Structures are given as structure tokens and as C-alpha cells.
Image (cartoon, rainbow, N blue to C red):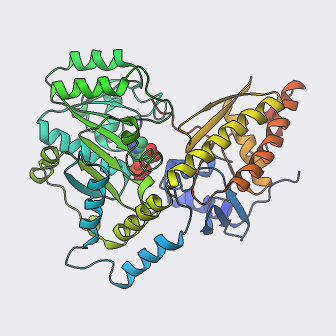
Amino acid sequence: MEEIQTGSGQKLYNEAKKIIPGGTQLLSKRPEMFLPELWPAYYSRAKGCRIWDMDGKEYIDVSFMGIGANVLGYANDEVDAAAKEAIDNGGMSTLNAPEEVYLAKKLLELHPWAGGVRYAKAGGEAMSLAVRIARAYTRKDIVLFCGYHGWHDWYLSANLANKNALDDLHIPGLEPLGVPSGLAGTNLPFHYNRIDEFNALMEKHKGKIAAVVMEPIRNDYPEDAFLEKIRKATKEAGVVLVFDEVSAGFRLCAGGSHRVLGVEPDIAVFAKGMTNGYPLTAIIGRHDVMDAAQGSFISSTFYTERIAFAATLKSIEVYEREKVWEKQSAYGRLIQDGWKEKAEKAGIELEIGGILPMSHFAVIGEESPLVYKTFVSQEMLKRGYLASNAFYTSYAHSEAIIREYLENIGEVFAAIGECMRKGEKVEGLLQCGVCQSGFGRLN
Ligand SMILES: Cc1ncc(COP(=O)(O)O)c(C=O)c1O
């Protein structure tokens, strides 16, 4: 198959790296995370599950769909019409947008355990707000956490007391540069499904813990009543249980994944699963806990803009009307089963994980999994796909698109298998360097 031709996107990214530290605003969108020097980098247009690069070349997105932000697909007509109407009626004014209240009512209707809602703009920021509220409510400092929750001081401070704390859930060797050293010891990690680790921390820091912060589900399903045990222990200790639903929310049902898992937190945070790409996040919580937000100054101009509220209300309406979660999981099943079948056929070993709407795999072999991952992106790009080692399903995908994708990835798996059997290096087939690793997650 012919070599990948570079174009305007790669050129622009080289310019970007000189004036934007890190090149992009989101680690997960760095071209080096996919195909160094060859990834198209920028888009001119996106619609459904298709993306056009700066030179007008069309791709099918079978990777992260806006890094998880486009559950309904790109440029969804109904959602965008609601956003455009909000723009035409004034996206901002001195008075508040009524949609703020309509959305709060909707979120509380979906989560009857909660009694209050606040908003922010980004997932990590909303998590930071949740931690602030939990600390304000309990008047305590320590947080126990599991998983990835953003870039803010409260979170990165985990690496102050133990410089390896975030190694296996974020990025190995991360220096918490710029995080005040006084926060050392205020954020302590435990692993998903490790109730022994959680219990030990609860015992050791008894009386000083403000919150337990975790995703209710991500890669693994809870085992041995893990969530119920955490719920019981936090309730007994007066510790606020915060469920981070930034990624899992609105993927397994309308609302938080905890609704399916049957455990109610004290606070839940929603973000990219809920808005179909518009910048809005919601922190919902028990009435008494959320009242603490009143006493702790949390206030921002852009938290009040109307467009994202209008778009989010419409996203949720479409999501519920079309029961989008059923499609997302059905597609995820098809993908995971397809990967397994194609890998068996190719004679290669795969490790497959993730909840169905956010499935991922790793090729197991003698070379680094990143080598195989880069090769997959390279070969799939040649075939017109933006692909990686994960597939976040959206309403804009279809069974036909997924079946064709599986045929294509089956050919790439076969090429890897052939290379392995010949005792040759897959790295030798790369037209670029090996991709950088993303961050792992503790759950
Ligand atoms: C579980 C979880 N929490 C927090 C975040 C951070 O959200 P954002 O990138 O919107 O700040 C992410 C993003 O991937 C996430 O998956």
C-alpha cells in the first residue's frame, strides 16, 4: 500500500509546536499520540462520524470521536439547530439563561437522589469544583482517589508526597511542577477493585478525609460489591463520595453509569458524555452537600453562557428519545467480538478491555504495544480511517460502517501476524517514529 502523503495539517502542526507549548490544548489530541509527523492533525469539517482534513481528504473516525465528546456524532443537526437558535437570541446577556434552570431540572429528574446542580466548562475543572464543595462541606482536607480526574492542583498534588503516585494512572514520571508543596499528602490513590487499599487509607486517615473521588466504572466492572462497600464506608465516616461521570456518564444509560450500577454517590460530575461537543459540565449532588457551594466562592462569567445549555438540553432529549446508549453498547459488542475474531484469524493475541461504548485493545507481542498501535493507525489511515487502539462508539456510526472497519482492521492484524511469524519487527514497517504513550488509568 502506498506511503502516506503529508499535507497542510502536518505543516501547521509544526508551526503550532513553536508557538503553542505542547502543540495542542489536550494531550490526547497530540498527533504524536497517534502517528508522529503523519497524523492529519487538523480538520476543516466534521459531520456524523466523518472528518475532512485541511486538504479536504475524508476519513471515517473509528477512534475517539472528539475524545469522547461526540456521543451523537459530529455536527448533529438537531443539537446544532438548538445552539444556533441560542446564538440568534443572544448567547450572552446581563440576565441569566433560563436553560440553566431547565437543564438543572432535567438532571435532577434523571437523578432523584440529587437536590442541587452547579455548572462549569471542562471536566477536570468540574472535578476540582466537586472536591472544593466536598472539602467545604466536611471542613476536611484529605481526598482518596482512584483513576484520572484532570490536571488541577488538588489532583496532581498526589505526586508531591509520592512522586510515583500517578505513574500507573496518568503519566509516568510526572513532576507536579507549579503545584504548591503545601498540598503534599492531601490526595492519596487507591486502585479500582482493591477494597483492601481503600480500607487501609480510610483507617489511616480516619477523621481527616473530605472525599472519595472515583469513576464508578471504566475499564473493569466492579467486583465483589466494590462500589457498595465504598458507599457504606463513606456514609458511615461522613465522607463525601464523588462519582466522576465525565466519560462514563450518558454512555450506559440516560445519566450516570451509577444508575445502572445501583450505587448513589453524594456528588456526580457530568461533562463530555452529555453535551455532544459543547463546553458545559455539571456537578450534581445531595442538597445539603451542594449547599456548601454557596459558602465557598465559586463564580465565573462564562459558566452562564447560553449556547452550551441549549445544546446540552437538546443532546439529552435526542439521547433519551433514540435510546442512544442501546446502540452504543450494541456497536461496542460488535467491535469487541470483531477484534477477537479477526485477531484469532490473524494468529495474534489481543488484550481487550473497556466498557462497550469505550472499547480498547492492545496487541501482545515481543515489541512494545505502542509499536503495534502506531502500525494500526498508519495502515488504517491509508485505508481512510482515523483509527487507534480504541473505538468510542457514537450514534453516527452504523453496523455497516463497523463491519467494514472490522474487515480493514482484520487485514492490518493479518499483516502483524505475518510479520511476527517471519520473526521480523513490525517497527521496521513504520513510516514514522513510534507513537507516544497516553496516560493509563487506575481503573
Ligand atoms: C474520568 C475523567 N475525568 C476527568 C477528565 C477531564 O476532563 P476534561 O478533559 O474535560 O477536563 C476526563 C477526560 O478524559 C476523564 O475521562
Q: Position of residue 380 (x, y in %)?
A: 76, 49
Q: Which residue is located at x 46 percent, y 59 percent?
A: 319
> Quadrant location of residue 137?
top left
| Image side of residue 43 versus residue 71, left or right | right
> Quadrant location of residue 211?
top left
Asked if residue 281 is positioned above or below residue 245 in the image, the reply reads below
Q: Residue furthest bottom?
A: 88
Q: Position of residue 54 (x, y in %)?
A: 67, 69
The one of 16 and 232 positioned closer to us in this rendering: 232
Asked if residue 239 is positioned above or below residue 97 in the image, the reply reads above
Decide if residue 92 is in sight here: yes
Q: Which residue is located at x 42 percent, y 64 percent?
A: 317
| Image side of residue 220 versus residue 265, left or right | right
Labels in figure, total: 0
Q: Which residue is located at x 13 percent, y 36 percent?
A: 138
| Image side of residue 48 versus residue 210, left or right | right
Q: Which residue is located at x 47 percent, y 48 percent?
A: 251
Q: Position of residue 146 (x, y in %)?
A: 37, 30
The one of 337 and 293 positioned closer to us in this rendering: 337
Asked if residue 286 is positioned above or below residue 60 in the image, the reply reads above
Decide if residue 38 is in sight here: no
Rendered-image quadrant of the C terminus: top left
Q: Position of residue 274 (x, y in %)?
A: 41, 56
